[in-house]
């Protein structure tokens, strides 16, 4: 029996979870090893692994691409998640599904708590919400962990894209009227290990504390990296035509996990630690 099966282990969070669970008996599945849209393969892999916990960190995460390929988005984020939950029932495994702040419409003027009504504005958010409902409907021991704006030293993300653009000397324009909580995956992964140790199944918000617009996040990255870069402007979201509608307020408040002592540090502190780790 394995302590934990990490599905989507090649992604940013999957890699961080693999690090966070080192020392325990862990089985990891990257996308080329297990396609979560293949129900039979998923059930066979879970049976083979027989894990105490399954963490589903696999998803179609490109929000604009989801808008153009809704069938694929639902197949991965909703049916794929459901496939894993069906496998979990067979082995009696507990399930962790990582979800998103984009289940909310962003019109609330303050950060979203776990019990706030959901109302996704885009295909990505809708498909992830479907995944949440399908999993919780199948496995009673499900932890849904909603998070926001993940970054890492791996894979494509806001911070790496910004640094690459700075290296190329490009003139940068970032939106200053959409907010979220930038979250370093390595701190989220540790938070998830703590959460499943102390918290009962349920829905939890876990991101680095505080909020930032895309522009404020970019400014802080450059500050932390000690890069003086004058070619950076703040612009309203109306300056860009994006396929997906992005909620203006994507800030999550950790209400439920904090009561059990599971909290992540402020996003600026985490970002400074991330920069120090590079
Ligand atoms: N990134 C964010 O800002 C953000 C914000 C809020 C919540 N989340 C949630 O946090 C979780 C982790 O996100 P992340 O940033 O680590 O994402 P990521 O880096 O894009 O990783 C997702 C992983 O899922 C894999 N995957 C995609 N389709 C699959 C399939 N059919 N079968 C198996 N694996 C598949 C991807 O493989 P390929 O690379 O081969 O496609 C990739 O390795 C996701 O549930 C996401 O919805 C992310």
Image: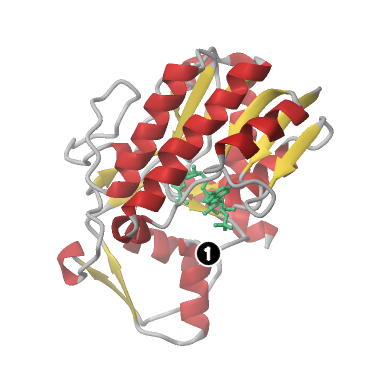
Q: Identify the residue at horizontal 35%, vertical 84% (top origin).
A: 171
What residue does disc 1 label?
A: 156
Locate the C terminus by quadrant. Answer: bottom right
Task: Give the secondary structure at mark 1.
Answer: loop
Query: Which quadrant of the view contains residue 119?
Result: top left
Place of residue 148 in the rendered image (x, y in percent of width and height, measured from the top left): 42, 44
Q: How many numbered marks have been drawn onto this rendered protein structure?
A: 1
Q: Is residue 167 left or right of residue 211?
A: right
Q: Is residue 257 left or right of residue 63?
A: right
Confirm whether residue 149 shows in the render: yes
Q: Establish if 152 lies above or below 162.
A: above
Q: Identify the residue at horizontal 40%, vertical 59% (top origin).
A: 217
Q: Identify the residue at horizontal 51%, vertical 22% (top origin).
A: 143
Place of residue 252 in the rendered image (x, y in percent of width and height, measured from the top left): 36, 35
In front here: 233 or 123?
123
In front here: 20 or 253?
20
Q: Establish if 130 lies above or below 34.
A: above
Query: Which quadrant of the view contains residue 239?
Result: bottom left
Q: Identify the residue at horizontal 23%, vertical 34% (top origin).
A: 110
Is the C-beta of the residue carrying label 1 under 8 Å from the nearest atom of ligand 1? yes
């Amino acid at each position: 029996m394995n302590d934990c099966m990490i599905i989507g282990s090649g992604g940013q969070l999957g890699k961080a979870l693999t690090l966070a669970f080192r020392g325990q008996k862990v089985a990891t599945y990257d996308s080329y090893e297990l396609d979560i849209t293949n129900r039979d393969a998923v059930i066979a892999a879970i049976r083979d692994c027989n894990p105490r916990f399954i963490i589903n960190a696999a998803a179609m995460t490109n929000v604009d691409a989801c808008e153009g390929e809704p069938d694929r988005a639902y197949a991965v984020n909703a049916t794929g998640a459901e496939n894993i939950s069906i496998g979990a029932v067979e082995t009696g495994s507990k399930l962790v599904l990582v979800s998103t702040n984009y289940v909310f419409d962003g019109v609330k003027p303050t950060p979203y708590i776990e019990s706030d009504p959901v109302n996704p504005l885009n295909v990505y958010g809708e498909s992830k919400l479907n995944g949440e409902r399908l999993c919780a409907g199948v496995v009673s021991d499900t932890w849904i962990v909603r998070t926001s704006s993940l970054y890492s030293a791996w894979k494509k993300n806001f911070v790496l894209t910004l640094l690459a653009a700075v290296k190329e000397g490009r003139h940068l324009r970032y939106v200053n009227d959409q907010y979220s909580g930038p979250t370093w995956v390595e701190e989220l992964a540790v938070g998830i290990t703590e959460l499943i140790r102390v918290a009962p199944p349920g829905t939890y918000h876990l991101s680095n504390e505080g909020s930032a617009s895309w522009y404020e996040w970019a400014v802080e990255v450059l500050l932390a990296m000690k890069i003086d870069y004058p070619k950076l402007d703040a612009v309203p979201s109306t300056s860009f035509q994006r396929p997906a509608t992005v909620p203006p307020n994507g800030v999550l408040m950790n209400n439920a996990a904090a009561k059990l002592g599971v909290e992540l540090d402020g996003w600026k502190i985490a970002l400074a630690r991330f920069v120090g780790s590079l």
